Image: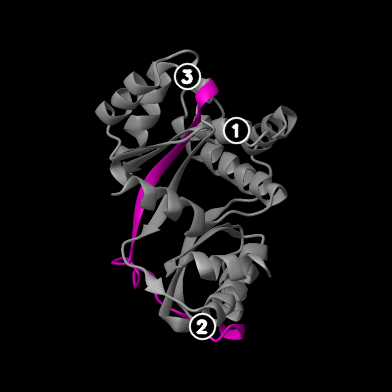
Amino acid sequence: MGRVFEKRKHKIFARNAKLSKLFTRIGKEIAMAVKAGGPNPESNTRLRMAVQNARGMNMPKDNVDRAIKKAAGGEGADYAEITYEGYAPGGVAIFVDASTNNVNRTVGNVRSFFTKCDSSLGTNGSLAHMFERKGEFIIENAALKGKDADEFEMELIDGGADDVVRDEEGFMVFVPFQGFGAMAQKLEQLGVEVKSAELKRFPLVTTAVDINTARNVMRLIDMLDEDEDVNTVYHNMDLTEEVEAELAKG
């Protein structure tokens, strides 16, 4: 994949929620990780990555410790991970990742958002050919602790990265879905702490849209983003610079 395109995809194909919602999402991920593999980050890779993500987002340590203790004590809700797929105006593909303690509530909300926005909710798997799941690691330059950047990039490639994007702030590393765990281990061996490590979905095909279609699609995405059960919303709009500029105006 071209590096410039990968970086642009990072910007336009996923909409990240506000900080408060990111904290909620991390809290749910910690709860699911603890219930799946125990409360010790040293022996629970999923929990270790969740704690690293929390640290990268400047989530207070007390919040993290409280979430781990609560889940370890069997308190709080049991969350299920669930996805929704469908089409927005203009034939734009929408993929929704959610985690919920009430599937009926979540599917009801998501279905209502699609209906209100003249969109259609499809069956799971209907967009499997349009998105691929990949691991994304964000590493700030400070985390290298004096390591040579060029040598570090070679280490990343040796560790299974299929694309590495560098800028003035650091590195954005992409790995195949199956290589996520191996890259996490590689970075731990190198003593490099990540700012974030996530599995994300990237479109294999894109749909060109005009400004009116883009606004209609964004209305649906904004509704989904506001739902407490929704973690991330992905789309395959190909936004030109002109359309992006118009969207930025509100």
Question: Given the current orientation, which residue lies at the most extreme top position?
Answer: 146
**From the viewer's perspective, is residue 215 above or below residue 73?**
below
The range drawn in magenta is 115-142
Callout in the foreground (3, 1): 3
Q: CA distance from mark 3 to mark 2?
A: 45 Å
Q: Quadrant of residue 17?
A: bottom right
Q: Residue 144 has which mark?
A: 3
Asked if residue 129 lies in the magenta stretch, the reply is yes
Q: Is residue 223 left or right of residue 139?
A: right
Image x and y of residue 70, in percent: 68, 37
The crowding category of the residue bearing disc 1, from other C-alpha atoms within 10 Å (few below 14, some 14 to 19, many at least 20), is some
Image x and y of residue 91, in percent: 41, 81
Q: Earlier in the sequence, mark 3 or mark 2?
A: 2
Amino acid at dot 1 = Gly
Q: Residue at x 28, y 67 (%)?
A: 129
- The residue labelled by disc 2 is 119
The crowding category of the residue bearing disc 3, from other C-alpha atoms within 10 Å (few below 14, some 14 to 19, many at least 20), is some
Q: CA distance from mark 3 to mark 1?
A: 15 Å
Element type at marker 1? helix
Image x and y of residue 44, in percent: 47, 29
Q: Is residue 83 left or right of residue 20?
A: left
- The residue labelled by disc 1 is 56
